[in-house]
Image (spheres, coloured by chain):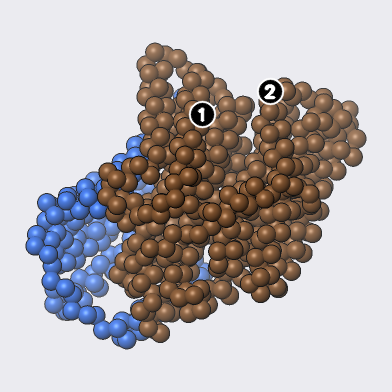
């Protein structure tokens, strides 16, 4: 499909681009009038994100499966599903930013919202990219904006240090990835995934080794985006140093976009040649299994001793990337479906957890666990209750949404015969219960001491948290609704 | 390009690239980078990509390296500092990995003799042909890059104005 025809399927991206320009122009106008602090950039950004979601939701009903812009992007149910999810992540991040003490009132707020929206735009493109060029470009775009957003906090050394670490790790990972991509292009003579799939089918034995090496290099880039072991080292520092809304956006948005790219690349670009494609031709299954088990185990073990809530959630998000990778290793539609379901549930519960952490940081100025002591008994009963719901859901306890998510991922693994990997996953869930419950215990069972001041939460700040905890509870019981949505999105367009 | 010329250029460009990494003085490294990029542009000419070759020299060897030199001089990095040298295991892994990759490439190439390249289309590599591709097949990446550059400027300004 040529460029003009493609624009019909390009609504969310166009809306977001327009919103980016609007926020930028507005910021420029405000600065020219000497207005330093204004809430308008944030409100325009919120409207832009909402309009992008609206446009993506409208596309959900379009059954077409097409190449867009020559052979750069694809339009299918999978990409639209991710666009809605990523749009929601962006909306939540903007909403959080509007209520965040770290972000509001900064003189460069306009730039912050411009960058946040462009990061969202890049992630939407990541979800649809089916061409090595677009994949690399959109991934770099998303990374570049994330680096700056991470270092956004003024006069905060932790934030600057996190941005630098993120930049260096990102540079290495993206260098490895593009080197791998150049090998794939050299071996198959094509940059779009359909051409790569056709090229792989004709590879002979010695080229297979080279192809496998190229896949490992490309995995470095994707693994860095989803924070999987051994490319996870940046996550704890970046999550701790970045402003909380950015941390939440990276944890849910960036990870989802990374998974969208990973799944599309391996199911379409690599997997289309044969029943499970290249899985049987190169030791991809073994590699994936190893990465998945290592990611789950390392994330959970490292989270056990954390005292800072953001750091704890960072390690927990590494562990959750491991659970989602289990669905990836299945290398089948059932696995894609499980990953989609898991990422959606993960979005709700993890975002909720970060939101409560932000509200508590707004109220107390602290993010470390001791400042949560007896929180429920000194004015924070509602946020403490919500956080408990999110953490139990993250641990995977029934009847919460997190349980259903894990159930489907593990179920897909069992169906594929990955019993050992599923056992590792279940054991890890048990381990994770320890550190999630420790937080709940601190909030409810520990007595507040004299130096712990009472805290106050405005009811309207709690609206979003209430919404997310309600979703966690409802999706734990009425998961069939989400499952039906995921079912239509699971088949990835393949040529 | 005949094989001896190619080999000579290849040795030169690898030597220059190694100098960029290994030389203790940042200024020398930047100058070696100019040489590397300039030699690479010769390869582009040999591949009938004249415009890319010219852009390589103007943009990379010219503007960007000059910018590097400015930054190095502004930061006053001219004095070579004593810096930690990589240990033997690291060097061994790096060299071993490099040899391994070279062996893989050689094995792959030996089995698949390079097929005769198809004849180049009319006007390959000239500005008009490149522009036509850029605004038809590659219009989306092209436009996206312009958004990326705009956002990069905004980000750079945002970071640089932190002091204010």
For image coordinates 18% across by 63% down, the residue present is B44
Q: Quadrant of the C terminus of chain A?
A: bottom left
Per the rendering, the mark at residue A460 is 2
Which colour represents chain B?
A: blue
Residue A227, given in percent of the width and then of the height, sits at: 57, 55
Q: Earlier in the sequence, mark 1 or mark 2?
A: 1
Q: How many numbered circles does the render carry?
A: 2
Q: What secondary structure is found at the residue carrying circle 1?
A: helix
Mark 2: secondary structure: helix
Residue A98 position within the rendered picture, expressed as x and y whole percent measured from the top left? 57, 26
Residue sitting farthest toward the left: B122
Name the foreground residue: A489 vs A36: A489
Mark 2 — on which chain does it sit? A
- Indicate left or right for B132 with B60 as reference: left
Answer few, some or many: residues within 10 Å of disc 2's Cα (few below 14, many 20 plus, some between 14 and 19). few
> Label 1: chain?
A
The reply, left or right, for residue A334 in relation to residue B108 is right
| A181 lies above or below A104 | below
The reply to whether residue B27 is visible in this rendering is no
Q: Is residue A354 visible?
A: yes
Give how far across and how far down residue B77 sits, in percent: 38, 47
Q: Residue at x 24, y 59 (%)?
A: B37
Q: Which mark is residue A46?
A: 1
**On screen, residue B14 above or below A34:** below
Q: Within 10 Å of the Cα at label 1, are there few (<14), some (14-19), or many (20+) other Cα atoms?
A: many
Q: Colour of chain A?
A: brown
Which residue: 49% across, 35% down? A54
Mark carried by residue A326:
none
Q: CA distance from mark 1 to mark 2?
A: 17 Å
Residue B82: x and y in percent read 46, 57
């Amino acid at each position: 499909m040529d460029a003009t025809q493609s624009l019909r399927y390009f609504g969310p991206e166009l809306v977001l681009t327009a919103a980016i320009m609007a926020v930028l122009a507005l910021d420029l106008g405000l600065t020219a009038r000497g207005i330093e602090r204004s809430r308008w950039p944030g409100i325009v950004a919120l409207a832009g994100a909402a309009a992008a979601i609206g446009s993506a939701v409208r596309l959900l009903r379009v059954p077409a499966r097409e190449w867009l812009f020559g052979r750069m992007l694809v339009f299918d149910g999978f990409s639209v599903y991710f666009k809605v999810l990523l749009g929601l992540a962006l909306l939540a991040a903007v909403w959080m930013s509007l209520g965040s003490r770290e972000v509001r009132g900064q003189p460069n707020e306009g730039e912050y919202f411009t960058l946040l929206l462009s990061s969202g735009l890049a992630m939407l493109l990541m979800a649809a990219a089916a061409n090595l060029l677009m994949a690399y470009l959109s991934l770099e775009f998303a990374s570049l904006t994330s680096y700056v957003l991470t270092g956004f906090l003024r006069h905060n050394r932790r934030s600057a240090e996190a941005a630098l670490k993120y930049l260096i790790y990102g540079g290495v990972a993206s260098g490895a990835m593009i080197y791998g991509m150049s090998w794939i292009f050299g071996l198959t003579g094509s940059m779009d995934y359909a051409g790569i799939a056709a090229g792989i089918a004709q590879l002979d034995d010695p080229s297979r080794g080279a192809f496998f090496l190229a896949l490992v290099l490309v995995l470095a880039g994707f693994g860095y985006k989803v924070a999987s072991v051994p490319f996870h080292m940046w996550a704890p520092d970046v999550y701790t140093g970045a402003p909380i809304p950015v941390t939440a956006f990276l944890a849910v948005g960036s990870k989802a976009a990374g998974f969208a790219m990973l799944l599309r690349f391996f199911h379409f670009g690599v997997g289309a040649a044969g029943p499970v494609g290249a899985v049987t031709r190169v030791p991809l299954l073994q590699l994936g299994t190893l990465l998945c088990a290592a990611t789950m185990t390392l994330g959970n073990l490292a989270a056990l001793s954390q005292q800072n809530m953001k750091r704890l959630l960072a390690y927990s998000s590494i562990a959750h990337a491991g659970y989602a990778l289990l669905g990836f290793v299945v290398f089948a539609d059932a696995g894609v479906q499980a990953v989609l379901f898991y990422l959606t549930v993960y979005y709700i519960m993890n975002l909720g957890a970060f939101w409560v952490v932000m509200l508590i940081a707004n109220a107390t100025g602290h993010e470390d666990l001791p400042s949560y002591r007896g929180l429920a008994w000194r004015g924070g009963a509602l946020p403490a209750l919500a956080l408990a719901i999110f953490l139990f859901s993250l641990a995977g306890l029934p009847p919460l949404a997190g349980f259903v998510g894990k159930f489907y991922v593990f179920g897909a693994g069992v169906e594929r015969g990955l019993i050992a990997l599923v056992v590792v996953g279940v054991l890890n869930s048990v381990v994770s219960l320890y550190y999630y419950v420790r937080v709940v215990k601190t909030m409810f069972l520990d007595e507040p001491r004299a130096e712990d001041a009472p805290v106050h939460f405005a009811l309207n700040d709690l609206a979003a948290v209430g919404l997310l905890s309600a979703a966690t509870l409802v999706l734990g019981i009425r998961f069939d609704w989400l499952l039906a949505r995921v079912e239509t999105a699971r088949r990835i367009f393949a040529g | 390009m005949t094989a001896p010329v190619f080999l000579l250029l290849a040795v030169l460009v690898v030597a220059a690239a190694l100098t960029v990494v290994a030389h203790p003085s940042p200024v020398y490294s930047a100058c070696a980078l100019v040489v590397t990029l300039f030699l690479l542009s010769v390869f582009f000419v040999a591949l009938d990509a004249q415009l890319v070759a010219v852009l390589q020299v103007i943009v990379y060897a010219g503007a960007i390296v000059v910018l590097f030199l400015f930054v190095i001089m502004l930061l006053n990095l001219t004095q070579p500092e004593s810096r930690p040298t990589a240990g033997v295991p690291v060097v061994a892994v790096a060299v071993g990995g490099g040899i391994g990759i070279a062996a893989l490439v050689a094995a792959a190439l030996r089995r698949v003799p390079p097929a005769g390249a198809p004849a180049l289309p009319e006007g390959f590599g000239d500005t008009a042909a490149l522009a036509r591709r850029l605004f038809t097949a590659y219009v989306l990446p092209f436009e996206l890059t312009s958004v990326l550059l705009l956002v990069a400027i905004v980000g750079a300004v945002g970071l640089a104005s932190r002091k204010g």
